[in-house]
Image (cartoon, rainbow, N blue to C red):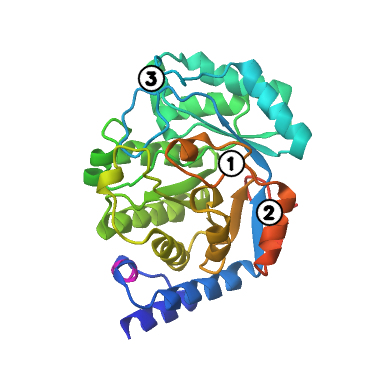
């Protein structure tokens, strides 16, 4: 009866409280009811449409001086497979994406390379903007903004405004991982703090720079941690309306130091339930994105019945998931994405980074 009342409340567009969120997270029996309610709610919000973006990931370096336990991507400078792309190589990758599939966006992410000077980041954006005046540059998480702020002794706002002036359009809301300090410290003790992440994201939003919102789940986090994270994100969205979408990132453990401590819950079932709960709780998010590189195409299609409405992007490369042991590939063509969405009985719609529909 408690579950039914929570689902009815969400379907009536009434906001769930944190206790009700915890109840959903702890529910073990009626998972199909939660998924069905999330699908019904999503259809009310987004009808039968599923969006996607034609983009390319640019992973510019895997050299990093942080030691996050969930990461299999990090390398040291002396590693045989360490790399750092120069601007020419980055421009070549973008040109390939433009010519091959007509990308609208690049998503630029990488390790925190201790040898990179601030000018590398600024000049990267300038080089891309000079070469591609119309492409959307989605780049640099709060972690990079923090590093630039520390290196230059400048406030976050000044760093972000300089990047925008050079051509930055939006930022990924990654480096969030889990925004519950005790657990966060266990999995990424050297990363920026919860307070720093929040301040940088709020600063970006106040300057008109949109970001995504993310969570890393399926590791050592508790349900209480998840409540703390999602409640914070929802309050931030109430305050700024600056998040474009919510992206739940299932933990890929195979090649990480955290692999022996992961939660024992069945990954597919937990993923579908989690997506559904996001739809029911995050009432100020129109867009919930699935992650085909992390969970596979079949599971991503099934998640469309659990409250998600965005299929993500073409990507072309995705080294971070692959380095952690992901096996589902790095590229889907636009035609493949369209056909997959249609096969799920949904209507594919191409979008840009800010969810404007073509």
The tag earlier along the polypeptide, 2 or 3, is: 3
Residue 11 point in image, percent of width and height: 48, 77
Q: Is residue 23 magenta?
A: yes
Q: Main secondary structure of the magenta part?
A: helix
Q: Are marks 2 and 3 in contact (CB under 8 Å)?
A: no
The region drawn magenta spans 19-24
* Residue matched to label 2: 337
The percent coordinates of residue 32 (x first, y second) are 44, 76
Element type at marker 3? loop
Q: Which residue is mark 1?
A: 330
Q: Nearer the viewer, residue 190 or 213?
A: 190
Do the residues under discs 1 and 3 have CB atoms within 8 angstroms?
no
User: Label 2's element?
Assistant: helix
Q: Quick check: can you spot residue 4?
A: yes
The crowd level at tag 3 (other Cα within 10 Å; few <14, some 14-19, many 20+) is some
Residue 76: numbered disc: 3
Q: Earlier in the sequence, mark 2 or mark 1?
A: 1
Q: Kindly state the secondary structure of the residue where label 1 is placed.
A: loop
Question: How far apart are the two marked residues, 2 and 3, measured between alpha carbons?
Answer: 36 Å
At 53% from the left and 60% from the top, the residue drawn is 299
């Amino acid at each position: 009866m408690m579950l039914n009342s929570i689902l009815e409340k969400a379907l009536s567009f009434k906001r769930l409280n944190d206790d009700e969120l915890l109840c959903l997270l702890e529910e073990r029996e009626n998972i199909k009811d939660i998924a069905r309610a999330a699908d019904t709610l999503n259809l009310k919000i987004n009808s039968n449409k599923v969006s996607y973006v034609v983009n390319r990931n640019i992973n510019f370096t895997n050299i990093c001086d942080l030691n996050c336990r969930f990461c299999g991507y990090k390398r040291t400078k002396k590693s045989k497979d360490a790399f750092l792309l120069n601007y020419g190589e980055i421009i070549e990758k973008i040109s390939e994406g433009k010519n091959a599939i007509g990308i609208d966006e690049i998503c630029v992410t990488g390790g925190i390379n201790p040898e990179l000077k601030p000018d590398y980041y600024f000049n990267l954006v300038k080089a891309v903007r000079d070469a591609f005046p119309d492409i959307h540059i989605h780049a640099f998480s709060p972690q990079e903004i923090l590093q630039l702020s520390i290196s230059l002794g400048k406030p976050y706002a000044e760093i972000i405004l300089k990047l925008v002036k050079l051509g930055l359009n939006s930022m990924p809301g990654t480096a969030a991982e889990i925004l519950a300090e005790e657990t966060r410290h266990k999995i990424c003790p050297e990363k920026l703090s919860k307070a720093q992440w929040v301040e940088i994201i709020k600063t970006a939003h106040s300057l008109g720079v949109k970001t995504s919102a993310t969570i890393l789940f399926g590791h050592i986090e508790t349900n209480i941690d998840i409540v703390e994270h999602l409640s914070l994100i929802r309050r931030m969205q109430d305050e700024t309306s600056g998040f474009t979408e919510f992206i739940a990132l299932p933990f890929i453990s195979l090649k990480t130091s955290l692999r022996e401590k992961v939660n024992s819950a069945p990954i597919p079932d937990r993923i579908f339930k989690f997506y559904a709960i996001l739809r029911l709780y995050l009432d100020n998010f129109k867009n919930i994105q699935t992650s085909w590189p992390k969970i596979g195409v079949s599971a991503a299609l099934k998640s469309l019945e659990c409250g998600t409405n965005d299929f993500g992007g073409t990507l072309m490369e995705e080294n971070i998931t692959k380095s952690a042991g992901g096996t589902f590939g790095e590229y889907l063509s636009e035609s493949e994405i369209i056909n997959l969405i249609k096969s799920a009985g949904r209507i594919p719609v191409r979008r840009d980074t800010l969810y404007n529909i073509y």
